[in-house]
């Protein structure tokens, strides 16, 4: 708190809470057209394996309704629908240009009848209670101003028996490995952002936001605090990313 104002972090900067969403929108509006390309370059394509691992653990079933929050370009929703066969996915994102890029993808044309695209806030979802069978958020929750509020909203909109699954960058358990990964992240990724997306600052923020996000066990406790049961996590690529799962029982 500063002079009665609530503050939060935007990367390594401290900002007023009511400023962060606008700044995040600015970042993703700037990189939307090159977002998927940058994901492939930054991770060497490994992010695709992580998302496939997410689907393996989730095991989508026919007829399920998915809410994919911060789902902009549709990667998770497309995977979900392919696995489920019959089902429906609502892609929600704070940044409309990300949704526009998602709708441009070929998968969106083939699955148009199974997809909705909604501009909305993870902390105040525009849906009734107990609407969805599955809630996913992939590389998005660290950008939310108050992640605990987003988890509470996830719990609210899930049906009893519904599943939460979060894919997010995390922390390596080995300090030397973490140091090497940090060196790569801070020295290489912003330069890639400059070359490929003509936007160094946005990728500097993205790297910093990863370092500010809670570690695996701390985030697991936040999921439990939101009311989810049978909550667990799995490390991916030695903890570069982690999958967290919980159930509304």
Image (cartoon, grey):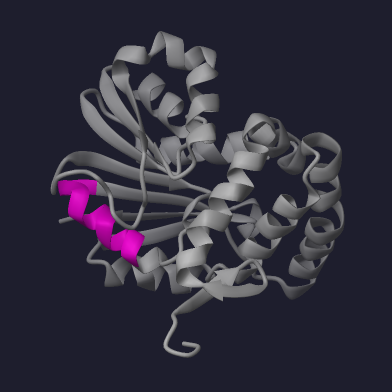
Q: Position of residue 198 (x, y in %)?
A: 81, 39
Could one spot residue 45 in this view of the protein?
Answer: no
At x 42%, y 9%, the residue is 110
- Is 232 colored magenta in this rendering? no
Q: Residue furthest top?
A: 110
Q: Position of residue 34 (x, y in %)?
A: 69, 32
Image label count: 0
Q: Which residues are magenta?
A: 149-162
Front-most of residues 174 and 187: 187
- Say above or below: 52 vs 187: above
Q: Residue furthest bottom?
A: 3
Q: Position of residue 89 (x, y in %)?
A: 32, 29
- Say above or below: 65 vs 110: below
Front-most of residues 38 and 182: 38
Using residue 20 as the reference point, say whether residue 58 is left or right of it: left
- Say above or below: 7 vs 178: below
At x 44%, y 59%, the residue is 233
Using residue 16 as the reference point, say whether residue 32 is left or right of it: right
Q: Position of residue 114 (x, y in %)?
A: 30, 18
At x 74%, y 74%, the residue is 175
Quarter assignment of residue 135 = top left
Could one spot residue 143 in this view of the protein?
Answer: yes
- Is 157 colored magenta in this rendering? yes
- Chief secondary structure of the magenta portion: helix
Looking at the rendered image, the quarter that the C terminus falls into is bottom left
At x 65%, y 35%, the residue is 35
């Amino acid at each position: 708190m500063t002079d009665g104002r609530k503050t939060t972090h935007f990367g390594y900067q401290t900002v007023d809470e009511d400023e962060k969403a606008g700044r995040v929108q600015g970042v993703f509006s700037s990189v939307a057209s090159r977002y998927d390309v940058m994901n492939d370059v930054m991770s060497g394509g490994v992010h695709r394996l992580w998302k496939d691992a997410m689907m393996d653990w989730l095991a989508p079933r026919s007829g399920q309704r998915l809410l994919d929050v911060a789902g902009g370009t549709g990667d998770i929703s497309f995977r979900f629908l392919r696995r489920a066969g019959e089902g429906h996915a609502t892609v929600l994102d704070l940044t409309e240009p990300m949704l526009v890029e998602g709708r441009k993808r070929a998968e969106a044309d083939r699955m148009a009848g199974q997809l909705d695209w909604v501009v909305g806030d993870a902390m105040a979802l525009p849906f009734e209670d107990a609407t969805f069978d599955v809630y996913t958020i992939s590389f998005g929750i660290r950008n939310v101003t108050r992640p605990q509020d987003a988890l509470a909203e996830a719990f609210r909109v899930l049906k009893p028996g519904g599943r939460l699954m979060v894919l997010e960058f995390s922390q390596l358990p080995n300090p030397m490995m973490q140091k090497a990964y940090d060196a790569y992240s801070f020295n290489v990724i912003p330069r890639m952002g400059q070359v490929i997306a003509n936007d160094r600052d946005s990728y500097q923020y993205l790297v910093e936001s990863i370092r500010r996000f809670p570690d695996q066990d701390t985030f697991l406790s936040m999921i439990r605090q939101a009311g989810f049961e049978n909550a667990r996590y799995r490390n991916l690529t030695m903890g570069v990313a982690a999958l967290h799962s919980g159930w509304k029982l």
